[in-house]
């Protein structure tokens, strides 16, 4: 769904139910992976695994939840990848990132349904997800990797945390923007709709499709 | 109260100080394996199984005397048999007792994320505590000697303990006690090093092994199992004994610089976002305002 849909109450449907569901499958599984992963990352955070039912259980579940996360990423790829291609407008958006950072959104080029930052988030998670999947498969049952192939394990132990750290950077910015800064964004991924003014302010080009076709329906 | 934890020098995955750091007087111990007087009788293999109460497992025939290809989670002590043709055209059957080397810089312990699953005692023994082990298998990647072995049934990792239970009671390890030729010795690291060096000198001066020497690899800070080798310049011939074992560099990179960079970046990131919020606050939409005209009208 990329067409904006005007709801009977005058609001705009931003995320359909399947989109919201897939976002939260990814979100909940990612948070579990993040917390258990941090527990294994640093002794100072090992208590997280204890809170989550014990480190042995965390170690057993982490890869399976990783599978859920990867499946949600595949789902997202099928639904969103076509809308995530960079445009000329995105290049300009990056060029004027300072306006976005300083909340001067009216100075930014009109963005479509997803702005350049959201696209970067999508592709960052996509590529890091592939790295995490490949290295994670090696780390899942490391005793299956014969000694003569141990280079695989040694690559995996360094690729997995690097890719995870990159996703953590993306995740922190994403959660911060989506909850604290861009008021209304969190509601849109929970209930699905935004106000017309919200759409016009942050995703002008997308909103203008409504302007052209006010009768657009789901 | 047991004072065993006061003899611990290093703990895996541990935040904060180590309980016994520098507290107790303790000698560093070592096992000396003289491969030149080993006859391959495997008494040490049996003694290891007996003392540790390990279940018996099937042997694997590979056209050699070797019991199985590698040590396993319930077989911690294996004599590796290797046919070797030296430059003089003769044939040697090299026999090396393979087990945990109890490294001074243990890659397994460094890689382990579980608090207390691997400890290093003040006497140098590196011991796995299976009740704390979470079965992640990172120790398998950290070890340069292929020693920790994963048990699929218990999903824990096992290896030679250097009979830490016996040593703590003033006894020598079971394998030492069983050796009939005296090729196995146990004592302080200094004593064993001295004994090994004197044997190596004898091999060089009297027995014609010009390259005889003691294997105590410095890349892992030295080990608490030492070998006397006929040819210390070719440890690989003894069933893949690494020439220069080290904690793998990717493990080092992960546990040292990446960990600190990552922690700094995460804390800095949270702080940066907080400061951003203080400075710029939220983006808000003024709902009561007209949508500015730009493009077509709705």
Image (cartoon, coloured by chain):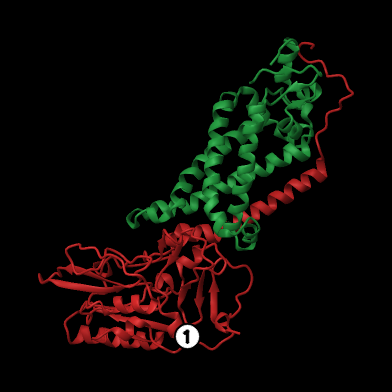
Say above or below: A209 vs B281: above
Q: Chain of mark 1?
A: B
Q: Nearer the viewer, residue B203 or B4?
A: B4
Q: What residue is drawn where x is 86% and y is 25%? A: B287
Q: Find residue B275 and report its horizontal and vertical position in percent.
A: 78, 48
The image quadrant where one finds the N terminus of chain B is bottom right
Residue A128: in sight, yes or no? no
- A143 left or right of A198 in image: left
In the rendered image, the vertical position of residue A213 relative to residue A121, given as above or below: above
Q: Residue furthest left?
A: B89
The residue under the point 27% across, 63% down is: B69
Residue in the foreground of this view, choosing between B157 and B57? B57
Nearest the camera: B53 or B243? B53
Total count of labels:
1
Chain painted red: B
Q: In the rendered view, does A34 fall on the left or right side of A8?
A: left
Q: Is residue B6 left or right of residue B291?
A: left
Where residue B42 appears, x then y in whole percent? 25, 76
Q: Which chain is green?
A: A
């Amino acid at each position: 769904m990329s067409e904006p849909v005007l709801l009977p109450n005058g609001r705009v449907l931003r995320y359909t139910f399947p989109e919201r569901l897939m976002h939260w499958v990814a979100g909940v599984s990612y948070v579990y992976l993040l917390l258990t992963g941090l527990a294994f990352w640093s002794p100072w955070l090992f208590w997280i695994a204890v809170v989550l039912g014990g480190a042995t259980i965390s170690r057993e579940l982490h890869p399976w939840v990783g599978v859920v996360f990867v499946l949600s990423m595949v789902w997202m790829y099928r639904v969103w990848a076509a809308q995530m291609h960079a445009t000329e407008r995105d290049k300009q958006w990056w060029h004027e990132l300072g306006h976005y950072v300083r909340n001067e959104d009216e100075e930014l080029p009109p963005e479509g349904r997803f702005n350049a930052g959201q696209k970067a988030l999508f592709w960052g998670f996509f590529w890091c997800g592939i790295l995490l999947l490949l290295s994670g498969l090696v780390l899942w049952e490391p005793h299956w990797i014969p000694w003569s192939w141990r280079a695989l394990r040694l690559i995996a132990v360094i690729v997995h945390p690097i890719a995870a750290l990159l996703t953590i950077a993306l995740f922190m910015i994403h959660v911060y923007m989506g909850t604290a800064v861009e008021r209304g964004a969190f509601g849109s991924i929970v209930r699905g709709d935004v106000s017309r003014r919200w759409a016009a302010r942050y995703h002008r080009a997308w909103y203008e499709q409504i302007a052209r076709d006010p009768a657009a329906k789901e | 109260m047991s004072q065993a934890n006061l003899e611990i020098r290093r703990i895996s995955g541990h935040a904060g100080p180590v309980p016994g750091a520098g507290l107790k007087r303790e000698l560093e111990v070592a096992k000396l394996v003289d491969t030149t007087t080993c006859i391959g009788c495997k008494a040490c293999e049996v003694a290891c199984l007996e003392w540790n109460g390990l279940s018996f497992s099937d042997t694997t025939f590979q056209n050699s005397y070797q019991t199985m290809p590698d040590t396993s989670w319930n077989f911690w002590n294996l004599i590796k048999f290797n046919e070797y043709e030296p430059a003089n055209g003769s044939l040697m059957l090299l026999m090396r007792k393979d087990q945990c080397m109890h490294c001074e810089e243990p890659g397994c312990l460094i890689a382990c994320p579980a608090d207390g699953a691997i400890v290093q005692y003040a006497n140098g023994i590196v011991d796995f505590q299976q009740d704390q082990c979470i079965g992640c298998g990172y120790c398998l990647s950290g070890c340069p000697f292929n020693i920790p072995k994963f048990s699929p049934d218990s999903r824990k990792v096992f290896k030679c303990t250097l009979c830490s239970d016996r040593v703590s009671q003033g006894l020598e390890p079971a394998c030492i006690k069983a050796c009939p030729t005296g090729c196995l010795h146990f004592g302080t690291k200094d004593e064993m090093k001295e004994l090994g060096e004197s044997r190596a000198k004898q091999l060089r001066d009297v027995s014609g092994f010009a390259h005889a020497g003691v294997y105590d690899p410095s890349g892992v800070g030295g080990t608490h199992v030492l070998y006397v080798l006929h040819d210390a310049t070719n440890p690989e011939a003894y069933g893949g004994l690494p020439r220069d074992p080290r904690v793998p560099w990717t493990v080092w990179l992960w546990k040292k610089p990446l960990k600190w960079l990552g922690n700094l970046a995460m804390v800095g990131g949270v702080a940066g976002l907080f400061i951003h919020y203080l400075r710029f606050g939220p983006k808000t939409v003024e709902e009561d305002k007209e949508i500015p005209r730009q493009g077509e009208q709705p």
